[in-house]
Image (cartoon, rainbow, N blue to C red):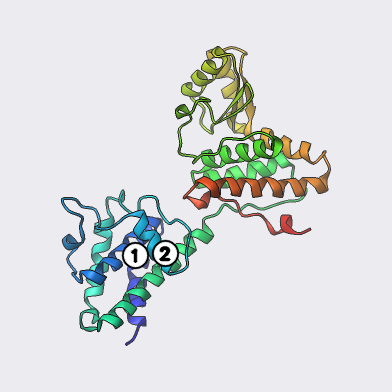
Amino acid sequence: MDISVYTEMVRHWWESFPQRSRSRGNIAGGLVLLENLRDNLSFSVDDHKAAASDQLKNATPANVRNILARFNESRTLSREAGRTNRGLMTNLAPFLEAIATTDIVDLSPENRSTAIEAMQAFLVARARDIFNADVISFEYTPNASSREIVSKILRVARERQKDGDVAEYLVGAKLALRFPEYEIRNSASSAADDQTDEQGDFRINDCVFHVTVAPNFGHYEKCKQNVDNGLRAFLLVPDDRLSGARQNAEQEIGESISVESIQSFVGQNIEELSEFARDKVRVNLKLLLEKYNERVAEVETDLSLRIRIPTALQTN
């Protein structure tokens, strides 16, 4: 039995996608489809659809986790396991057609299981590629200011359209380091702050913090509600939105809220914790990133939000 026939076949299917479509959803779908073939060796797409739908049968996060666990992989691939990918069954059809060209039908149950395991192993390896490559990396320059380092991180995150999430976690990590005696709220970045009692992203005593990379009327309105309720409000925005946000806030609310730069808010904290000593800045920057990654890992399934800590920060 030549296992390479199956691994090359799944490789050809995977590499037929454009880079943007080599996604977590397609990996999850492929893993589940192969699992389904253990019990239903049909090469008709319709036979692998859930009842009265165009979704893949058995495509649940739990099933994907169980498959990954067999390969000693505990990281979460997808919240939806491909269920919200409308083109998933279309993407899987050529995969089924390719499998049908092999001799898998003629294999013994044991060898068929081995072939399926080999194909799943290929897809698990692609999942690990995503897990390992997705994290946010930035170039650390020892002479750069803390504010500029935060700017670098946000620029990389913006390229991935994740700067809003990263900004919120950076502010949360900063507050958790600066005020260890307080419990700093930590929830998945997709959780809307209007579902919380604080009416903001974070709260310490009578101060509420709102973090956004795209300030709009809704943010100013929430800040106004905070003030009306006897609280103080901080609106944290990127450097390039600071001037406009301050003008809008003054027009909408007046001078009752503080509008500050995310970069300065987080960077200044690193400097203060370091007592403005360069050697201590490196230590506290590492602590910030470790706290950031810790908070992401606690609540997120999208671990690509983590930040790779540069080697220069990890040396004593």
Q: Residue at x 59, y 33 (%)?
A: 238
Q: Nearer the viewer, residue 130 or 246?
A: 130
Residue type indicated by callout 1: Leu
User: Pointer 2 and pointer 1: residues touching (CB < 8 Å)?
Assistant: yes
Label annotation for residue 201: none
Q: In the structure shown, which secondary structural element does the residue marked by tag 1 occupy?
A: helix
Tell me: 66 left or right of 185.
left
The CA span between labels 2 and 1 is: 9 Å
Q: Earlier in the sequence, mark 2 or mark 1?
A: 1
Q: Nearer the viewer, residue 159 or 92?
A: 92
Crowdedness of circle 2 by 10 Å Cα count: few (<14), some, many (20+)? many
The residue tagged 1 is 31
The residue tagged 2 is 68
Q: In which quadrant of the rendered view does residue 270 lie? A: top right
Q: Is residue 5 visible?
A: yes
- Residue 86 in percent (x, y) is at 27, 50
Q: Nearer the viewer, residue 212 or 42?
A: 42
Is 17 drawn above or below residue 250 in the view shown? below
- Residue 119 in percent (x, y) is at 35, 73
Q: Nearer the viewer, residue 149 or 82?
A: 82
Q: In the structure shown, which secondary structural element does the residue marked by tag 2 occupy?
A: helix
The mark tally for this picture is 2
Q: Residue at x 27, y 58 (%)?
A: 58
Q: Quadrant of the N terminus?
A: bottom left
Tell me: 70 left or right of 54.
right
- Residue 71 in percent (x, y) is at 44, 69
